[in-house]
Image (cartoon, rainbow, N blue to C red):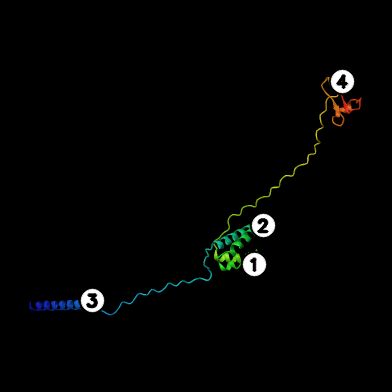
Amino acid sequence: MAKSKKKQQKDKAKALGCATGVVILLGFSACDAIFGDDEPEPLTVAPLRTTATASSAPPTTDADSLTACSRTAQAAALRKAGQKKRAINLESAALAAATTSAAPDLARLGPTRTRANIKLLRGWCATHHPGIKAGPVEPEPQKTRKPRPQKTTSKPAAPSTDPRFPTCSAANDAGYGPYREGVNPEYAWYQDRDGDGVVCES
């Protein structure tokens, strides 16, 4: 019995000593936090490193360069379709847009349509705007020729003449005449007795 009491007292003393030590340690750390001179070190965040690949150039969002590249792609499609004239016109328009672009490489291109300028423009577009594709190529409008007016081979209809009578008096009785020389063909059918150029006058 005596031993167990002594053991209990020792355990109590140990527990009390441990508790006292913990309280002291907590007190020191609290005092150090309140009255301590040490300032906490600032957190430093390392900047993110971006590695740019040499193969992929940054896309240019300049409207003129986009226009130039889309026209260049469409011109190439027109050339494949055999529409050379339309392709040449579109290439000239592409160079005109390229020279007003904010991209320095394109601004150096001349507006004149040469093979070298077109080749440089195609290469630039393939690097900076690889996603631009040509639209559908419409068939070239067919030239409609106006039909030539056909020559009429039919002769003009002969003027109609009055019925022929045996005499002028018969013609007058039927309600025809007079006939003038050089005007009416019926004049030759009858005799001009007085020579005044008129026959069958009533």
Q: Which of 8 and 105 is in front in this view?
A: 105
Q: Which residue position holds label 2?
A: 85
Position in image of residue 99 (x %, y %)? 59, 64
Amino acid type at circle 2 is Lys
Helix, strand or loop for disc 4: helix
| Residue located at (88% from left, 26% from top) | 189
Tell which circle, 1 or 2, labels the residue nearer the N-terminal end.
Answer: 2
Q: Which residue position holds label 4?
A: 169
Helix, strand or loop for disc 2: helix
Position in image of residue 75 (x %, y %)? 62, 59
Mark-to-mark CA distance, 4 and 3: 158 Å
Q: Do the residues labelled 3 and 2 touch (CB within 8 Å)?
A: no
Amino acid type at circle 1 is Ala
Mark-to-mark CA distance, 1 and 4: 98 Å
Q: Which residue position holds label 3?
A: 30
| Residue located at (24% from left, 76% from top) | 34
> Where residue 116 is drawn, which disc sits there?
1
Tell which circle, 4 or 3, labels the residue nearer the N-terminal end.
Answer: 3
- Seen in the picture, residue 138 relative to 170 is either above or below; the reply is below
Position of residue 90 in the picture relative to residue 1 (left or right): right
Position of residue 54 in the picture relative to residue 78 (left or right): left
Position in image of residue 102 (x %, y %)? 55, 66
